[in-house]
Amino acid sequence: MTAQRQERYGSRRQIALFALLAGFFCTHSLDFAARAATTERVVVNRYSGLAIEGFDPVAYFTESMAVEGLPDIEAREAGAVWRFRNEGNRASFVAHPEIYGPQFGGYDPVDLGRGVTYAGNPRFWVVAGQRLYLFGREDNRDAFAANPLPFLKEATVRWPVLEQGLAQ
């Protein structure tokens, strides 16, 4: 083989190796990015850092409605920023986040029962058994509200495994 052929053959091999490695790293980095973007133990807006889109979690109990919290009244809990309508709601939440925070980290319990983590929408909610549940769709909320027990049984069984798969 001439030196010119060897040079051409060698550069083709280098290009092929580079393309193979680039494809490998692109595929795996995209897979990692997709997992990182959708795996939180508490549903948080990735741009604002707000839990439940800034709605006051205590207001679901005290006012029986979804009420947006105020930017001036916040607390940090479980890696998220929570907003409140007033200082009293903030104090109640800080004292008992396990009671006032949405169950299952704000994931839809109907979908959890199916083995899927789907973020709840703070506008689709139910307080059942003195706990707040958020739902991704209105029909999930309506089905849950009609008979929560079977959905809670399934979600409770599946949640520990699903929660482990979520980032901290």
Image (spheres, rainbow, N blue to C red):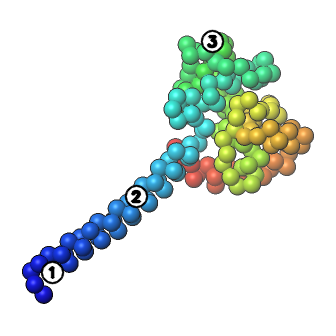
Looking at the rendered structure, the secondary structure element under dot 1 is: helix
Looking at the rendered structure, the secondary structure element under dot 3 is: helix
The reply to whether the C-beta atoms of the residues labelled 3 and 1 are less than 8 Å apart is no
Where residue 147 appears, as percent x and y from the top left, is 89, 43
Which circle, 3 or 1, is nearer the viewer? 1
The N terminus: image quadrant = bottom left
The amino acid sitting under disc 1 is Arg
Seen as rendered, the residue at the extreme right is 146
Circle 1 residue = 5
- Crowd tier of the residue under label 3, counting other residues whose Cα lies within 10 Å: few below 14, some 14–19, many 20 or above: few
Q: Nearer the viewer, residue 12 or 107?
A: 12
- Crowd tier of the residue under label 1, counting other residues whose Cα lies within 10 Å: few below 14, some 14–19, many 20 or above: few
Circle 3 residue = 87
Q: Nearer the viewer, residue 69 or 150?
A: 69
Q: CA distance from mark 1 to mark 2?
A: 31 Å
The reply to whether the C-beta atoms of the residues labelled 3 and 2 are less than 8 Å apart is no
Q: Is residue 11 above or below residue 49?
A: below
Seen as rendered, the residue at the extreme bottom is 1
Res. 95 in view: no
Res. 108 in view: yes
Q: Nearer the viewer, residue 11 or 153?
A: 11
